[in-house]
Amino acid sequence: MKLGPRLTRAWQDMEQITIGAIEGFCVGGGVALAVALDFRVMARDAHMRVPEIALGMNMSWQSVPRMLHLMGPARTKQAVILADQRISATEAYEWRLVEEVADPGKAFDAAMALATKVAAQPPLSVAMTKLTVNRLTHVLDDLASHMDVDQFALASMTEDHKEGVAAFLERRKPRFKGR
């Protein structure tokens, strides 16, 4: 419960620019890791999904504020609350969840091309700009996400969580009761 938030915060706070290449599928914690990066490149045939709500859990690792900054409130709610919805690469680009869509099998190459462009810039100026943008963007995030771990712990003890996990394992629709 504590490792994920520390990991995503460390990636966000790195002085260097971070770029992710997404091939295949990016689900749950993978999405939380991806939104902690500076840039994301996604293969055209890849998809994202956030299944935590359907499992009776909350989306944690401070990813909701990060998603909110990238996509806005309605799309963040759509991505997180409508847990059975796959987000295609085209949708992820249109929603501003990724910055670039690449041909299948070429996301890494596209990410490396972007990294080459970034590396050609003056390192100190890049680091200062990243720091300024991140500080301005995330200044209130701790206020909103301080309860991630608490909410995760509380949600994991509910009947709905047990039902969500059981339904997932049994490949059936869950029957949530709000308990």
Image (cartoon, rainbow, N blue to C red):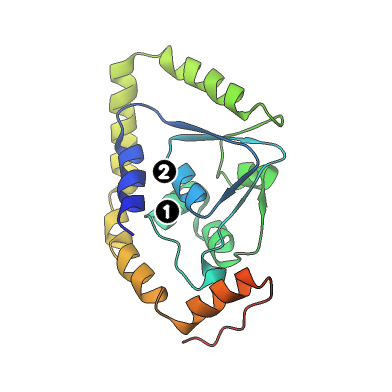
Secondary structure of residue under mark 2 = loop
**Of the residues shown, which amino acid type is indicated by label 2?**
Ala
Could you tell me which residue is drawn at 68 percent across and 70 percent down?
Answer: 171
Mark positioned earlier in the residue sequence (1 or 2): 2
Q: Nearer the viewer, residue 90 or 44?
A: 44
Q: Estimate how packed mark 1 is, as few (under 14), some (14 to 19) or many (20 or more) residues with alpha carbons within 10 Å.
A: many
Could you tell me which residue is drawn at 44 percent across and 67 percent down?
Answer: 58
Secondary structure of residue under mark 1 = helix
Could you tell me which residue is drawn at 30 percent across and 48 percent down?
Answer: 6
Q: Is residue 176 above or below residue 15?
A: below
Rendering quarter of residue 136: top left
User: Which quadrant is the N terminus positioned in?
Assistant: bottom left
| Relative to 132, 50 lies left or right | right
Residue 104 drawn at (x, y percent)? 71, 32
Instruction: Find residue 159 and name its label.
Output: none
Q: Nearer the viewer, residue 158 or 73?
A: 158
Rendering quarter of residue 62: bottom left
| Disc 1/disc 2 C-alpha distance (Å) | 7 Å
| Relative to 153, 29 lies left or right | right
Q: Nearer the viewer, residue 110 or 91?
A: 110
Residue 46 drawn at (x, y percent)? 67, 42
Instruction: Find residue 36 and name its label.
Output: 2
Residue 38 drawn at (x, y percent)? 43, 35
**Of the residues shown, which amino acid type is indicated by label 1?**
Ser
Residue 144 drawn at (x, y percent)? 32, 61
Please say if the residues under marks 1 and 2 sit with CB atoms less than 8 Å apart: yes
Q: Estimate how packed mark 2 is, as few (under 14), some (14 to 19) or many (20 or more) residues with alpha carbons within 10 Å.
A: many
Q: Is residue 121 above or below residue 104?
A: above
Could you tell me which residue is drawn at 62 percent across and 41 percent down?
Answer: 93
For label 1, the residue is 63
How many marks do you count on the picture?
Answer: 2
